[in-house]
Amino acid sequence: MAKSASSPRQSARVVQLRKGATVEMVRLTCPDASQALKIAESFGTAVIDSDGIRDLHERLIIETADALADGLGDKAMQIHLQRIVGAYVGSAHGAGQFYSRAVTEARDATAKAANDARDEDLDGPVGYDSAAQRKREFAADMGIQAHSLRMAAEGAVAAYAQVIGETWKPFDRPVEQPGTSISRKAAEAQISAFD
């Protein structure tokens, strides 16, 4: 059997990327300062010093970078701060998603409680809040937490821009292919010998 002189076909390999959380995603899921103030006033919780949290975290990252400046080169500093800021943004995004779910549950419970024909959603025993009230209070707590983490993330992102000189972007890492093991790669290399 004669083999044609054409070059062996290279299989196109598509690498899927796991997208990291962005600041825009955090801003979409976490309450802003005015909404956090509204939540605090409505539920009688502490009013958060949003600007103070943001400024503190910005200073923290800048001071950390200053302390590491002699020991790290520019690229190492960029990689280090990329990871640190990514942790802040990821944490805030997770809190924002959890807050969104808590609000949905609180709205659902409140809508059910408004239906007088449902016994299961009536107010609790004397001295206890209804399930709907507890869900609303839980959502309020999660909103304040998500807002606080949003401010910390925004401070970290601002510090990254100041130290590195460019806008922070999440690192999109390749998705690990669980079926691609060493033995599979070895088998593919061996079988390619027959091409």
Image (spheres, rainbow, N blue to C red):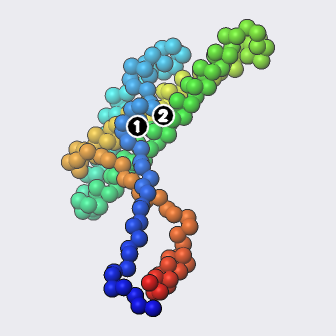
Q: Answer with left or right where residue 166 lies relative to residue 141.
A: left
Element at badge 1?
helix
Q: Residue furthest top?
A: 116
Q: Nearer the viewer, residue 23 or 53?
A: 23
Element at badge 2?
helix
Which disc number belongs to residue 88?
A: none
**Quadrant location, the N terminus:** bottom left
Residue 115's x, y, as percent? Answer: 70, 10
Residue 108's x, y, as percent? Answer: 63, 21
Q: Which residue is mark 2?
A: 96
Name the quadrant containing residue 49.
Answer: top left
Q: Report the residue at 28% width, 40% height from top.
A: 158
Q: Report the residue at 49% width, 18% height from top.
A: 39
Instruction: Examine the rendered structure and indicate whether residue 154 appears above or below residue 12.
Output: above
Q: Are marks 2 and 1 in contact (CB under 8 Å)?
A: yes
Q: Nearer the viewer, mark 2 or mark 1?
A: 1
Q: Which residue is mark 1?
A: 25
Number of callouts in the render?
2
> Alpha-carbon neighbours of circle 1 within 10 Å: few (<14), some, or many (≥20)?
some
Instruction: Examine the rendered structure and indicate whether residue 146 appears above or below residue 64.
Output: above
The mark nearer the N terminus, 2 or 1, is: 1
Give the amino acid at mark 2. Gly
> Alpha-carbon neighbours of circle 2 within 10 Å: few (<14), some, or many (≥20)?
many
Q: Residue furthest front?
A: 1
Give the amino acid at mark 1. Met
Residue 195's x, y, as percent? Answer: 44, 84
Residue 6's x, y, as percent? Answer: 33, 81
Q: Nearer the viewer, residue 17 or 3?
A: 3
Q: Nearer the viewer, residue 37 or 174?
A: 174
Q: Report the residue at 43% width, 57% height from top.
A: 16
Q: Residue furthest bottom?
A: 1
